[in-house]
Amino acid sequence: MTLRAATPAHWPVEQALSQDNDVAYWTTVPADLDEGAARARVAAWIDRRDEGRGALWVIEREGNACGQAGLVISPPAAIEVFYAVLPSARGAGVAGRTAALIAGWARRAGYRQIGLATFPDNVASERTAERAGFVRTGTTERRIKDRAHTLTTWVYAPAKRPVDGRSSHSG
Ligand SMILES: CC(C)(COP(=O)(O)OP(=O)(O)OC[C@H]1O[C@@H](n2cnc3c(N)ncnc32)[C@H](O)[C@@H]1OP(=O)(O)O)[C@@H](O)C(=O)NCCC(=O)NCCS
């Protein structure tokens, strides 16, 4: 699995994700983006990265793009992680490993407030968050796609056990 910094050429991944009902339902990605809208969203993420406000990566498995993940930076130093995987690649640990990689990198980069937010009942995302080392902290009110939602909030607080499930102790 490889995370690649998103480039303008990655717009088809954004479009493919927007065509998935789960992504349209559980995330801020609008449904059924056309090429222009997908290009614009990826370009906006590249602008955010250039301005130090966020980052977007394309997740590749065996050379094929299979999802996206990223982070939003809120001044002064809070990070919110997000992830989405195409249906054909789900259930193989991709999102859990990706979220753990991004959160671990952010921690090593000096960020101490690393969180994420999930829709209630998004069990797959909740399990992914737990798998990656996040724990629930409470709820937050957000307006998403013109509707008010109460989201579950999480903070990165990894236990000693790494994401692949093996003990970190040798004996
Ligand atoms: C949530 C999502 C990213 C998970 O991707 P994934 O690569 O299939 O997840 P993983 O294989 O890494 O699974 C991580 C954990 O979640 C569990 N899980 C995954 N899908 C699940 C489902 N539909 N129901 C219950 N548990 C699920 C896995 O079993 C695993 O737990 P485990 O390690 O204890 O076995 C994917 O379903 C998706 O893109 N959904 C739509 C977009 C979305 O909801 N994004 C998150 C917004 S907050």
Image (cartoon, rainbow, N blue to C red):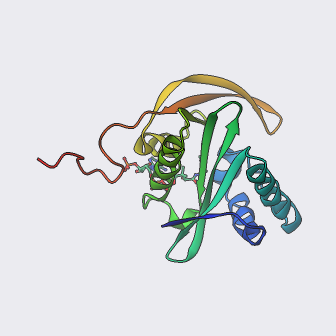
Asked if 30 appears above or below 76 in the picture, the reply is below
Q: Residue at x 73, y 46 (%)?
A: 52
Left or right: 170 as drawn, with respect to 110? left
Residue at the right extreme, as displayed: 36
Residue 160 percent across, percent down from the top left: 30, 39
Residue 33 visible in the snapshot: no
Q: Residue at x 15, y 49 (%)?
A: 170
Asked if 72 appears above or below 76 in the picture, the reply is below
Q: Residue at x 54, y 67 (%)?
A: 88
Residue 69 percent across, percent down from the top left: 61, 54
Residue 92 visible in the snapshot: yes
Image quadrant where residue 27 sits: top right
56 and 124: which is toward the camera? 56
Left or right: 83 as drawn, with respect to 42? left
Image quadrant where residue 169 sits: top left
Q: Residue at x 58, y 67 (%)?
A: 66
Residue 165 percent across, percent down from the top left: 29, 50
